[in-house]
Image: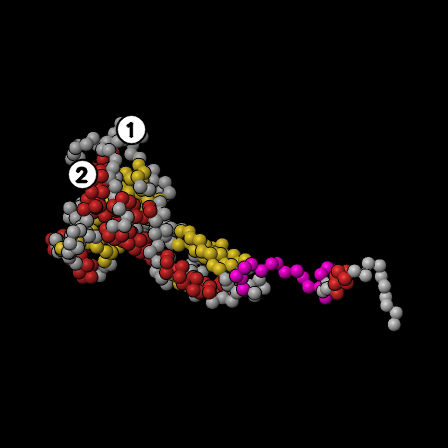
């Protein structure tokens, strides 16, 4: 048998090339080149194809814990994208202060982990705060989506402290927040926010919000020199409250918090009848005389058709910093018992901490100045619970 000889095949390297598997387009036995596999990746990861319908079906099974409906049906899933084994999506919450965000994230990741081919899940977060609908005869405030009133029927229970810290807590969570000092005869919010009395007294433009700690604050105290009393009768106070609501340029605001004067006064009634209040927080201290008055405040707002979010117990207890021993200086649990008796929610209890008083005197709310303190954490929980209740009320109202 004659040996076929071709030029160039005498060298061993050339013979190896001829015997090697085909690597070029058009050669018999060619296989398409695959991208280099990344270190640590599954051998099947690049070949796996994630079924989009399976992803949507998995997300359908995730429910908002407060609204008790699928996050897909609620329109909370945005920008769903699938790239290889990676799923990215945005979950649009009903409030940036959602108290159950971690629960929703855990449920989303758990649901998507069951979808074949999923290797990584990237979740971004957004929030779209819906506006509450005004009732007949109420005048909406341009740009303001929700109004939260903070009230008591007794002075000295820390209502302004609760209002200011809830406002700052909502702002820290990412919401757009305004705060009205509607205690016309005793405006304290300028002091609590470190703003000088009468800072707008010489202005020809009227009252304008001043931003501090992410909150836009308005108070009649901005127009009054320090120590100036307000000696007005009821109709004038009611008119002033209406002007604070409707004549101040609030702009885009998710939550407008209103610090009401104590008692069932003209200010409270005027605001409740004129403005579309989303709901009210009732503040009480634990002792019986305070709780009794707080229950009257609940009855007043219910008669005016204003939803009551629930009751807060301020000055609830004191823990001695040196010994750790707890003292119930004003009693304990009275507001919780009253809330249960009235059939409303108990929103939480705020301890007595020197830092709360010190922050108010320095003009730095404790939620901002000492965020890791027990009182700051309590204010934050209350703010988030109220924001969640607003979402539920809006869902129930369609």
| Residue at image mark 2 | 185
Please count the marks in the image. Answer: 2
Secondary structure beneath dot 1 equals loop
Mark 1 crowdedness (10 Å alpha carbons): few <14, some 14-19, many ≥20 = few
Query: Looking at this rendering, what residue extends furthest in the front direction?
Result: 11
At a point 50% along the width and 62% down the height, the residue shown is 119
- Which quadrant of the rendered structure holds the N terminus? bottom right
Q: Is residue 58 above or below residue 359?
A: below
Residue 238, can we see it? no
Query: Looking at this rendering, what residue extends furthest in the bottom direction?
Result: 1
Which is nearer the eye, 24 or 350? Answer: 24
- Which color scheme did the rendering employ for the protein? secondary structure
| Magenta highlight range | 23-42
Mark 1 to mark 2 CA distance (whole Å): 21 Å
Which is nearer the eye, 110 or 74? Answer: 110
Which is nearer the eye, 297 or 329? Answer: 329
Query: Looking at this rendering, what residue extends furthest in the right direction?
Result: 2
At a point 73% along the width and 59% down the height, the residue shown is 24
Q: Is residue 141 left or right of residue 356?
A: right
- Pinpoint residue 185: horizontal percent, then vertical percent: 18, 38
- Pinpoint residue 19: horizontal percent, then vertical percent: 75, 65
Disc number placed over residue 203 in the picture, else none: 1
Mark 2 crowdedness (10 Å alpha carbons): few <14, some 14-19, many ≥20 = some
Which circle's residue, 1 or 2, is located before the other in the chain? 2
Disc number placed over residue 165 in the picture, else none: none
Q: Is residue 237 left or right of residue 43?
A: left
Residue 350, can we see it? yes
Which is nearer the eye, 358 or 251? Answer: 358
Q: Is residue 374 above or below residue 191?
A: below
Q: Is residue 304 above or below residue 247?
A: below
Q: Is residue 34 magenta?
A: yes
At a point 16% along the width and 48% down the height, the residue shown is 157
């Amino acid at each position: 048998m004659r040996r076929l000889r071709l030029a160039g095949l005498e060298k061993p390297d050339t013979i190896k090339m001829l015997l090697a598997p085909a690597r070029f387009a058009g050669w018999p036995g060619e296989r398409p080149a695959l991208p280099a596999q990344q270190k640590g990746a599954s051998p099947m990861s690049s070949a796996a194809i994630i079924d989009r319908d399976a992803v949507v079906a998995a997300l359908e099974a995730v429910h908002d814990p407060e609204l008790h409906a699928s996050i897909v049906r609620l329109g909370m899933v945005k920008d769903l994208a699938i790239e290889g084994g990676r799923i990215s999506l945005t979950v649009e919450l009903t409030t940036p202060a959602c108290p159950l965000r971690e629960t929703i994230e855990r449920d989303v990741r758990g649901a998507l982990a069951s979808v074949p081919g999923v290797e990584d899940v990237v979740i971004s977060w957004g929030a779209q705060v819906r506006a509450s609908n005004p009732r007949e005869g109420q005048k909406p405030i341009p740009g303001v989506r929700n109004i939260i009133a903070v009230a008591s029927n007794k002075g000295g229970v820390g209502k302004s402290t609760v209002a200011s810290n809830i406002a700052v807590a909502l702002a820290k969570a990412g919401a757009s927040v305004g705060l009205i000092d509607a205690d016309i005869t005793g405006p304290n919010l300028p002091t609590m926010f470190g703003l000088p009395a009468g800072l707008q007294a010489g202005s020809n433009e009227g009252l304008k919000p001043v931003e501090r700690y992410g909150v836009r604050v308005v108070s009649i105290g901005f127009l009054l020199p320090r120590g100036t009393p307000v000696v007005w009768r009821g109709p004038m106070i009611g008119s002033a409250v209406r002007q604070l609501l409707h004549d101040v340029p609030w702009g885009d605001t998710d939550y407008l918090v209103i610090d009401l004067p104590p008692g069932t006064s003209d200010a409270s009634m005027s605001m409740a009848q004129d403005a579309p209040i989303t709901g009210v927080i009732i503040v009480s201290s634990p002792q019986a005389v305070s709780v009794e008055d707080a229950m009257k405040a609940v009855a007043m707002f219910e008669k005016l058709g204003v939803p009551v979010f629930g009751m807060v117990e301020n000055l609830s207890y004191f823990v001695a910093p040196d010994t750790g021993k707890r003292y119930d200086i004003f009693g304990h649990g009275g507001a919780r018992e009253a809330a249960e008796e009235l059939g409303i929610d108990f929103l939480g209890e705020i301890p007595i901490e020197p830092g709360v008083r010190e922050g108010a005197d320095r003009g730095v709310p404790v939620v901002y100045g000492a965020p890791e303190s027990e009182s700051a954490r309590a204010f934050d929980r209350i703010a988030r619970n109220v924001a969640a209740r607003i979402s539920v009320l809006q869902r129930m109202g369609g």
